[in-house]
Image (spheres, coloured by chain):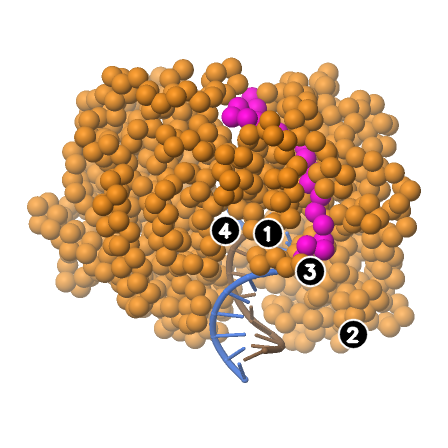
Chain colours: A orange, B brown, C green, D blue
Amino acid sequence: MKQSTLSFGKPDGSSSAAQSKNKPPAQQKLSFGVGGQLGIKKIGDKNAEAPIDSKLKVLNEASAKSEIQTDASVKSSTPSKSGVRLTKRTIEEVEESQIVEKVEVHSTTKKIRNNDGEATDFVKEEKLMVKSAQKSASASKQTKKDDEEMKEVEQNFPPKDLSKLKPPSSAKYDPIQDAPFHKGQLVPFGFIARGLSEIELCRGKNSKDAIKEIVANIFRSTILLNPRELPDLFYFFCVKLGPDYDSPETGIGIELLSNAVAKACGKSLKQIREQFKQEGDYGIVVEKSKGVQKSLGTFFKKSQETPKDLTFKRVFEAFNKIARQSGNNSQNEKESIILKLLQDATNEEAKYIVRWLQKNLKTGAAEKTYILALARAIAYTPPNHKGKILNSKLTLGDQLFAEKCEKIELAICEAICEFPNYGLIIETLLEHGDDLPKLKDRCHITVGIPVKPMLAKPTKGVREVLDRFEQVKFTCEYKYDGFRGQIHFNRNNPQQMVKIYSRNLEDMTGQYPDVVEFVEKSASQDVETYILDSELVAFDHVNNRILPFQTLTQRSRKNVTEEDLKTKICICAFDLLYLNGESLLKEPFIKRREILHKNLHEVQNSFVFAKYKDAEALEAIQEFLGDSIKDSCEGLMIKTLETNATYEPSKRSLNWLKLKKDYIDSGLGDSLDLVVVGADFGKGKRTGMYGSFLLACYDENLEVLQTVTKMATGLSDEMLAKIYSQLKDLEIDKPPSNLKFKEKNIDVWLVPKYVWEIKCADLSMSPIYCASIGSVEKNKGIALRFPRFIRERDDKSVEDATSSEQILEYYKSQPSLLKNDGEDDDFDF
DNA sequence: GCTGACTGCCC
DNA sequence: ATTCTGC
DNA sequence: GCAGAATGGGCAGTCAGC
């Protein structure tokens, strides 16, 4: 298997295809994945200078040397610094596409050559840009420059007449002729907004396919006309600014957004909230009542009334700029950036701007669908192909085309799971088109880049486990109650040997300096690199026991102090994904576990292997489940050992099951009968009814109701509707007179009447709920963890609801809180 | 400098 | 996290 | 069975306003 040459940045202009054909890889073969399938590149290797994700001029100080790992670590090491992140564009340099002639356009991402002088210029330019961005809330210089350039291009290409263009939903859509922009021009935001509207209309049979088709067509036009915009465009669709492990947040939530929307609509906050209650979505609110009604489809006409047609680039840069604001007055700055955007937007565009900021485009499609659409676009119009391929479906025929799509889907999904950096993946696709081995060469499991973690499916009991894993070897493992921690160790990167990623690929290294130190110390010399999957739990070294989840959450996340470090952490290791340069993902779990146990060593109370039992009999599993709960765990994870036992990142596949006591019907789980005392209106598909309910228990001594949780799941749509019609007549202006509560913003109070059975996983100390308030901690009550609806209890009256004392008892009886089961209760890992 | 509202991220 | 639903 | 979309408690961190 050919090693990726990774020799980018050569300004020789020769095509990459030619390069890889004519030039044998000069670089040393470093290591291979299992079976030689994967070329694994070591992080510390200088030759392994792959282009870094195209994103984010947003982040941090530029660091000109850029091993992937160093780069990805910048955020956590200098969290507060605002500055520039060096971005490498290499595709353009290497590529001389046969399809797309080069058109010099200013694009979101910038070129950098490996040449030092140019890189310096780049940094300077970016710093200037950031400076100007910070100075004023008005459109950045960058955008103005773009507009000017766009004008120039437009003089060469007169605007297209929208009325003659087919929409991306059309079966005959021509990605060049029917795109509302010319080659080299920036993608108009209206094109995207219109596409999203079309997606939203797709419902019913084959709708997913229709959606993929539309999005694929949008991507195809972008590939053919201005490919540099594709990475950001893809991130936009996924409602992200960049890779999960290395990108900033907008810091815009529902409250700041409602302020901005109110101003954009020229209405009071109160009015706008009322409208929100009716529409269930600020996107629709702004679409319906934004001030200036620009006519739809003007986005490509340079008419005088609409001097500021939005480009996608401008919108995305504004989002980045919002994310960059911090410190004094930043909220105002953010708001004014949003307002400017909304002013210049058509109502349709405004809808999606607002929805994007709400982190939900509400199109009925999301990330996974867009990934499949990307695959389809690549299948239709493979970039960088010899000869023009506009539509490979025409030459391949339906059958072959479908097969091709599937192959590309698989390859992209695998790449994304092992290397969740869409920027680099898309750059690779643009460079190599449907040459999938190239993608695999460059975007594979890598120390320092998080892998999408494998997830598990809930099961209802041991019976179900046995049914699913009939005739198959499996193992039962403790399910620890802590934070998922994917630990990367790389001895070759002395500056940062250890990185820790969360379940959602967030870089949490800064939160665990103690764990980092510990991992560094404990690695034996013959281990160079590894990626470990584990659960991090809070651990009491004196009494040798796991501490409650809540204790763990109280540690600082940055600027960790001595005080924080008093909460010791124990790594409960359960899987090994990578060792000494080799991927273990394709190995069966039985082997991965063996390799894990052989190569890493337990250290009492600090680094332990997840306790497991390869049990088969129902009773044995049941017993082990009981043990796990006694030992302060949530329950069991059940994993196949040999068949279907590879590590399948991000798949909530059937290979891993989770079994918790509260899943089991009429089992050990806590189930409470609670009184409905209030409700919040729903959003989205719950618009026009209640979306969640405030519940209370009954204190028999004080004869008061005490709030204990809100609850919103477990109800069918039908039930929700029925409940609304039942409860709406119970709405009252003031809270029930005998209710103890701290709620400030509940939408409606309800006459206490209905009692519901509610299940939960745990009970926790609450700063806002009032069950048995004060009896454990001053001013704190008890609340439910993971509450869900089981059934109505028509047979019960308010006074029959679960009592505060009962809840207090449940709370105190939780194993992780029991103080006496420590020392001689053998907690042998 | 303190507090409360808001946000993002854990589960 | 849990749960429901359309496809 | 998957993907998407509803929604939960509760923590630390950030910022506005006093």
Give the residue type that dot 4 points to: Ser
Are the residues at dot 4 and dot 2 in contact (C-beta closer than 8 Å)? no
Q: CA distance from mark 1 to mark 4?
A: 9 Å
**Nearer to us: label 1 or label 3:** 3
Tell which circle, 4 or 2, labels the residue nearer the N-terminal end: 4
Q: Secondary structure at mark 3?
A: helix
Q: CA distance from mark 4 to mark 3?
A: 21 Å
Q: CA distance from mark 4 to mark 2?
A: 49 Å
> Which class describes the residues within 10 Å of circle 4: few (<14), some (14-19), or many (20+)?
some
Are the residues at dot 1 and dot 3 in contact (C-beta closer than 8 Å)? no
Tell which circle, 2 or 3, labels the residue nearer the N-terminal end: 3
Give the residue type that dot 2 points to: Asn
**Nearer to us: label 4 or label 3:** 3
- Residue A402 falls inside the magenta stretch: no
Chain of residue at mark 4? A
Q: How many marks?
A: 4
Compared across the picture, whether A625 is left or right of A95 comes to right
Dot 4 corresponds to which residue? A76
Give the x, y percent position of residue A803.
85, 61
Q: Which mark is residue A511?
A: 1
Image quadrant where residue A793 sits: bottom right
* Foreground residue among A183 and A114: A114
**Main SS type for the magenta part?**
strand
